[in-house]
């Protein structure tokens, strides 16, 4: 197979990029008065303005050729048809089956997985209804008022993000907390004002072996039992599990009747719409959860069917790749102008970087090009008064994704127009900047001119949606999932394993007994780690 960097489309892009780098967005807009309407795409209720990217029609043509040459179409078909595309774990990758309608037929090894998905969804809906209505009572007969999800990574970030995003349609008479960190503070603060008799813990872990989650789950059980008189039978009314590991769930003491399952073909970071979304369903109700899944599915179908030049995730994935591989951009800023999406950038960090932070191809050879950029961000307008300075006038190129909604969820005077004016203004300022002549024309004195110049030519996408409904959230998440997929197909990497998290986990397990040993342990690490362990042991003795 020809190496990616020698592939025809890649090489064509390489020769094309110097011309592109010499062009300013000011020129591109001046040359085509309709650019701002032409380079837009509307699909699945999302309007994407990609006109403020440093591209010409030729760039787009070459990027699309790269996608085609990379076999993206075949990769999409392979995923949707249940092939084991997660080759290093020998697993199918079927998060798209989690949101397939009841009658769909998606097979893994000849077996349709969709009926099983809906069976779990139905059990979740029944359970959520019983808890929300007060039919499910705690051990001492009290109604459940507090839900605490215990999980980490994909078993936490999706649930927290979705709860925050959809808080406006959540049960306001219930409290939702999320515990992830093994730092005891996380658990302590999450429960400090809760009454155990009214609290339900959801232990969410695909494997049910993750150190942080199991440590927190044991502390939660101790906390609940201590408050509930020590009767182990209380666990059945105050703990449910979401996992693929029934044996470990039983061993923890949770009956498998109170377990909601999923499957090895659901990656942790692709699982917020599986039973891992139980806390989401408890918060927003089964109907809203169904709407969320509907949004995911609409984007899945768009991704599967739309031609690449009219395909939102494909275009966005390729544009990101253009900057990462040909402009040496190291990061992407995701900037939602919607306060409810405050955890969306954090959610995307796992989705994008655990997926595409890889250094070898599917065939195991070291890549000689960059893979995933660093994703980061904060809601606007807050970021404007913090790190936007660097995006506008710093020395690094940082492509931005602006996300905005036409309708506010909390109507408050002129707030929403101000919010939207800001998001439009930021894209404009980044693209067009302000020249030295313009600065001088405003009456700025000579020495100050360079400080007040905005070079512009800084690329951004603007995503405009109607309103942050459950369906809209599903569409947005699926959009980024498939962006990641598109990039991985071009980079020839496996977006669905995460071996990079293993080494640290193993080393930590080795160090724990050395920290806890009552006698001075014989240490055989490097001199730095040995010294840190000794210093910590000394410091904790006081
Ligand atoms: O540490 C990485 C990871 O395996 C993630 O991929 C996963 O989302 C997270 O840990 C939690 O895993 P689990 O759901 O099995 O507890």
Image (cartoon, rainbow, N blue to C red):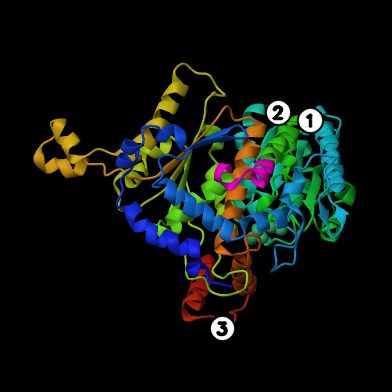
Q: Residue at x 88, y 47 (%)?
A: 233
Q: Nearer the viewer, residue 188 or 438?
A: 438
Cβ atoms at labels 2 and 3 below 8 Å apart: no
Depth check, mark 2 against mark 3: the one in front is 2
Q: Nearer the viewer, residue 456 or 180?
A: 456
Measuring from the top left, give residue 299's x and y in whole percent: 65, 40
**Residue designated by label 2:** 171
Q: Nearer the viewer, residue 517 or 400?
A: 400
Q: Which residues are magenta?
A: 300-311
- Cβ at disc 3 under 8 Å from ligand 1: no
Cβ atoms at labels 2 and 1 below 8 Å apart: yes
**Residue designated by label 1:** 132
Q: Is residue 446 magenta?
A: no
In the displayed structure, would residue 483 be above or below residue 410? below
Q: CA distance from mark 2 to mark 3?
A: 53 Å
Judged from the image, the quadrant occupied by ligand 1 is bottom right
Q: Secondary structure at mark 2?
A: loop
In the displayed structure, would residue 502 be above or below residue 391? below
Per the rendering, the mark at residue 524 is 3
Measuring from the top left, give residue 509's x and y in whole percent: 65, 70
Measuring from the top left, give residue 81's x and y in whole percent: 76, 54
Q: CA distance from mark 3 to mark 1?
A: 53 Å
Residue 526 visible in image: yes
Instruction: For the N terminus, give its image quadrant.
Output: bottom right
- Cβ at disc 2 under 8 Å from ligand 1: no
């Amino acid at each position: 197979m020809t190496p990616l960097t020698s592939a025809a489309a890649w090489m064509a892009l390489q020769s094309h990029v110097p011309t592109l780098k010499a062009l300013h967005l000011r020129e591109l807009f001046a040359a085509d008065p309709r650019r701002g309407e032409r380079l837009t795409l509307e699909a699945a209720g999302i309007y994407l303005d990609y006109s403020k990217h440093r591209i010409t029609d030729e760039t787009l043509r070459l990027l699309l050729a790269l996608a085609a040459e990379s076999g993206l179409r075949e990769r999409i078909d392979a995923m949707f048809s249940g092939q084991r595309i997660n080759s290093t774990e020998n697993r199918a990758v079927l998060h798209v089956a989690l949101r397939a309608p009841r009658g769909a037929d998606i097979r893994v090894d000849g077996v349709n997985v969709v009926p099983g998905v809906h069976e779990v969804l139905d059990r979740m809906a029944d359970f959520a209804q019983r808890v929300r209505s007060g039919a499910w009572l705690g051990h001492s007969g009290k109604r459940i008022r507090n839900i605490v999800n215990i999980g980490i990574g994909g078993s936490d970030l999706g649930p927290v993000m979705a709860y925050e995003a959809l808080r406006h349609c959540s049960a306001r008479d219930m409290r939702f907390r999320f515990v992830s960190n093994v730092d005891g503070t996380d658990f302590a603060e999450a429960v400090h004002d809760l009454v155990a008799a009214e609290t339900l813990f959801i232990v969410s872990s695909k494997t049910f072996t993750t150190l942080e989650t199991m440590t927190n789950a044991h502390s939660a059980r101790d906390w609940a039992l201590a408050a509930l008189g020590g009767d182990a039978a209380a666990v059945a009314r105050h703990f449910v599990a979401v996992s693929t590991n029934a044996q470990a769930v039983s061993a923890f003491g949770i009956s498998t009747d109170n377990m909601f399952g999923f499957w090895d073909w659901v990656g942790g970071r692709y699982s917020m719409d599986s039973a891992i979304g139980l806390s989401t369903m408890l918060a927003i109700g089964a109907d809203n959860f169904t709407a969320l899944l509907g949004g995911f599915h609409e984007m899945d179908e768009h991704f599967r069917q739309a031609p690449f030049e009219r395909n939102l995730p494909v275009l966005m994935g390729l544009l990101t790749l253009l900057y990462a591989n040909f402009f040496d951009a190291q990061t992407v800023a995701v900037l939602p102008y919607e306060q409810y999406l405050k955890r969306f950038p954090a959610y995307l960090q796992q989705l994008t970087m655990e997926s595409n932070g890889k250094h070898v191809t599917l065939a195991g050879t070291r890549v000689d090009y960059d893979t995933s950029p660093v994703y980061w961000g904060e809601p606007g307008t807050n970021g404007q008064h913090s790190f936007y300075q660097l995006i506008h006038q710093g020395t690094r190129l940082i492509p931005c994704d602006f996300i905005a909604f036409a309708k506010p969820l909390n109507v408050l005077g002129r707030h929403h127009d101000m919010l939207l004016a800001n998001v439009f203004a930021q894209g404009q300022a980044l693209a067009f900047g302000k020249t030295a002549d313009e600065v001088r024309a405003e009456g700025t004195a000579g020495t100050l001119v360079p400080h007040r110049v905005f070079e512009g030519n800084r690329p951004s996408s603007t995503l405009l949606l109607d309103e942050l409904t459950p369906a809209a959230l599903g569409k947005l998440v699926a959009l980024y999932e498939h962006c990641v997929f598109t990039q991985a197909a071009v980079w020839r990497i496996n977006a669905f394993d995460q071996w990079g998290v293993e080494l640290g986990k193993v080393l930590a397990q080795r160090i724990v007994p050395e920290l806890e040993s009552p006698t001075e342990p014989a240490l055989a690490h490097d001199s730095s780690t040995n010294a840190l362990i000794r210093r910590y042991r000394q410091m904790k003795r006081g």
